[in-house]
Image: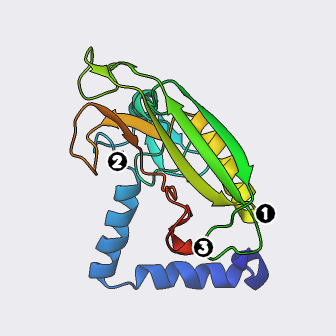
Amino acid sequence: SYQEATGPSAKKDNSKQKNDLPSKEQSKAKTEEEDKDVCPICMERINNKEILRKCNHAFCKSCIDQAMTYKQTCPVCNTVYGLMKGDQPEGTMSTRTVSSSLPGYPKCGTIEITYSMYGGIQTSNHPNPGKPYCATSRRAYLPDNKEGREILQLLRRAFNQKLIFTVGQSCTTGAKGVITWNDIHHKTSTEGYPEYFPH
């Protein structure tokens, strides 16, 4: 550490410098120190401190335990703890390769993804619990190259974690209570520019 390298005399000088800080800086340092002891959830002094291991944010143990029952992420920075699980309806994801290429990828074929989502009844995680929603299917496309296959694995994982679709209002038709994309971008046409691939 810095103090070990410079010896005990530097330690004295550092403490003297700290005491020589103008009162404005001292109060700012004190406020920052006090802020570290305030739980970002309840805004009270931290009781039974729990520090999250990945991001080092601190909370009251009871506050963070309760927050994690709703969403397994840090309430301050959204670092994920545990497996994220969505409210996607039941369905299947299948793939096939075709020889035709996508714009911008003339040297490889295409991976065609078919999502077949079943109809059902909305749960408590959806906008209108107890109301029905209809089945739907969607197609998406990736280049059949190393990058495309890597993205396919990520999409499979997201599908298994129920993150690709949700039930809500369609951005394209405005219809409510339907199966919709859930913010993971897909190329849904074999036409168009290559920058429309998921990233």
The one nearer the camera, 13 or 69, is: 69
- Give, as a three-letter code, the residue at label 2: Pro
Of the two numbered discs 1 and 2 in the rendering, the one whose residue sits closer to the viewer = 1
Name the amino acid type tagged 1. Lys
Q: Which mark is residue 103?
A: 3
- Is disc 3 placed on a helix, strand or loop? loop
Q: For mark 1, what is the residue?
A: 146
From the image, which quarter does the C terminus lie in?
A: bottom right
* On-image quarter of the N terminus: bottom right
Instruction: Name the residue located 64 percent from the left edge and 58 percent from the top edge.
Output: 142
Compared to residue 134, the image places residue 32 above or below, namely: below
Q: Which badge, 1 or 3, comes first in the chain's sequence?
A: 3
Q: Nearer the viewer, residue 50 or 24?
A: 50
Picture coordinates of residue 62 (x, y %)?
Answer: 41, 28
Q: In the rendered view, how is the structure colored?
A: rainbow
Residue in front for this viewpoint, 161 or 62 = 161
The residue to which callout 2 is attached is 40
- Identified by mark 3, the residue type is Pro
